[in-house]
Image (spheres, grey):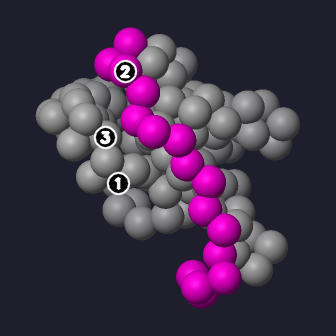
Amino acid sequence: MNTTATVESFPVGSVQDVLAALQDPVRLEMVRRLANAGIAQRCGVLYDTINKSTATHHLKTLREAGLTERIVDEGQVYARLRRTEVDAELPGLLDSIIAAANRARTD
């Protein structure tokens, strides 16, 4: 990504805000995919069973909870998991949730 990219993020929410955002299976899967990728991903690769407008809503919910940030670079929209920021506010929470989601995905 280049230096002219715009980034939109919010402060990490309370534990209640974060858990509320992750309680939806679609949003949990988006976060799981971002965590496993380890880098920002084009938003389109984060979902495959919903339409674009629904995905936009889910990504906004994750962003407003402080879990992700939105990056626009040369017309492409990316999402990045704010793992460092979330871990600073809610140590261990994200790791536990992602590990459980990965286990559930392989069962």
User: Alpha-carbon distance for marks 3 and 2?
Assistant: 10 Å
Looking at the rendered structure, the kind of residue marked 3 is: Val
Residue type, mark 2 in image: Ser
Residue 7 magenta-drawn? yes
* Residue 103 showing in the rendered view: no
Q: Please indicate whether residue 103 sits to the left or right of residue 30 in the image.
A: left
Q: Nearer the viewer, residue 80 or 54?
A: 80
Q: Position of residue 37 (x, y in %)?
A: 39, 61
**Where does label 3 land, which residue?**
86
Q: Amino acid at mark 1?
A: Asn
Q: Which residue is mark 2?
A: 14
Q: Which residue is mark 1?
A: 36
Q: Residue at x 65, y 75 (%)?
A: 5
Quarter of the image holding residue 16? top left
Q: Secondary structure at mark 3?
A: helix
Q: CA distance from mark 2 to mark 1?
A: 24 Å
Q: Position of residue 12 (x, y in %)?
A: 40, 35
User: N-terminal of the two: label 3 or label 1?
Assistant: 1
Q: Quadrant of the C terminus?
A: top left
- Give the magenta-colored segment's residue range: 1-16
Where is residue 45? Give x, y as percent: 62, 56
Q: Is residue 36 or residue 68 the one in the foreground?
A: 68
Choose top left, top right, bottom left or bottom right for residue 89: top left
Chain-order first, disc 3 or disc 2: 2
Q: Is residue 84 above or below residue 105?
A: below
x 49%, y 46%: residue? 68
The image quadrant of residue 97 is top left
How many angstroms separate mark 3 from mark 1 (CA)? Answer: 16 Å
Nearer the observer: mark 2 or 1; the answer is 2
Please tell me how crowded label 1 is: few (under 14), some (14-19), or many (20+) other residues with Cα within 10 Å. few
Mark 2 element type: loop
